[in-house]
Image (cartoon, rainbow, N blue to C red):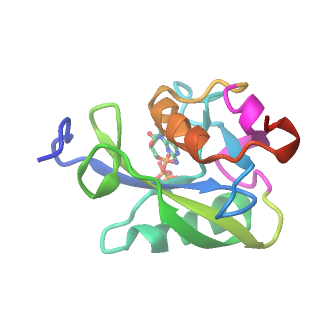
């Protein structure tokens, strides 16, 4: 049994939107506007999975609503909970998938007031929500350093 499984958590799904699924060099971070306790914190776009909805289906819906984009969904970025989910405090469990935009340009339409494409070098330049930091660490390990910076 995976450790730290919250009791009957709220299921959340989010996208690690990147420029390239195989060799990501940029990650999209979004600044929350709500609720006041989380406003100003940066996160991966996504949201709660509705009852009866599959996580990937919810991800497409959330990205359409929040950013106005269609995406292709890639690998799940596995966390320590069952089914690769990540704990967010004690009440939420979040599934994270890599994804790339296939239609549209991300805009902060709903729930966010700023977006930033972060490179490996400035991945920690924004104040991520605390629960996202271990996820960002896992993503940092996947992000290719541009060739000019390789030894
Ligand atoms: N989407 C998202 N939520 C996150 C992240 N990190 C984190 O702690 N959270 C928290 C914030 C919220 O308490 C919860 C997700 O709820 P949400 O507010 O995004 O869900 P939603 O879009 O469906 O919104 P609503 O039903 O409350 O209107 O998870 C993250 O990276 N992405």
The residue sitting at 26% across, 46% down in the picture is 81
Q: Position of residue 47 (x, y in %)?
A: 49, 54
Can you name the residue that lies furthest to the right here? 148
Question: Does 118 sit above or below residue 53?
Answer: above
**Residue at screen point 81% across, 45% down:** 146
Horizontal side of 5 relative to 100 (left or right) equals left
Q: Is residue 145 visible?
A: yes
Queried whether the magenta region covers residue 112, the answer comes back as: yes
Boundaries of the magenta span: 107-124
The image shows residue 100 at horizontal and vertical percentages of: 69, 66
Please indicate whether residue 54 sits to the left or right of residue 37 in the image.
left
Numbered marks: total: 0
Horizontal side, residue 41 vs residue 57: left or right: right
Is residue 93 shown left or right of residue 28? Answer: left
Residue nearer the viewer, 115 or 52: 115
Q: Is residue 59 a member of the stretch shown in magenta?
A: no
Q: Give 115 or 72, whichever is nearer the viewer.
A: 72
Kindly indicate the quadrant of the structure image that contains residue 88: top left
Choose between 27 and 148: the one closer to the eye: 148
User: Residue furthest toward the left?
Assistant: 1
Kindly identify the residue that appears in the image at 73 percent across and 68 percent down: 101
Is 49 above or below relative to 143?
below
Residue 78: image x %, image y %?
A: 39, 52
Quarter-of-image position of residue 80: top left
Q: Is residue 115 visible?
A: no
Image quadrant for the C terminus?
Answer: top right
Q: Look at 65% across and 36% down and name the residue there.
A: 33
Is 47 located above or below residue 103 in the figure?
above
């Amino acid at each position: 049994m995976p450790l730290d499984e919250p009791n009957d958590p709220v299921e959340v799904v989010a996208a690690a939107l990147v420029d390239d699924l195989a060799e990501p060099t940029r990650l999209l971070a979004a600044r929350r506007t709500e609720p006041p306790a989380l406003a100003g914190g940066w996160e991966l776009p996504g949201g709660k999975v509705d009852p009866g909805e599959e996580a990937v289906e919810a991800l497409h819906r959330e990205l359409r609503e929040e950013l106005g984009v269609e995406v292709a969904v890639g690998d799940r970025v596995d966390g320590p909970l069952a089914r690769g989910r990540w704990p967010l405090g004690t009440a939420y469990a979040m599934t994270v998938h890599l994804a790339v935009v296939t239609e549209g340009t991300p805009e902060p339409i709903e729930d966010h007031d700023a977006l930033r494409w972060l490179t490996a070098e400035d991945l920690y330049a924004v104040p991520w929500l605390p629960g996202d930091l271990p996820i960002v660490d896992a993503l940092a390990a996947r992000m290719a350093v541009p060739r000019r910076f390789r030894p």
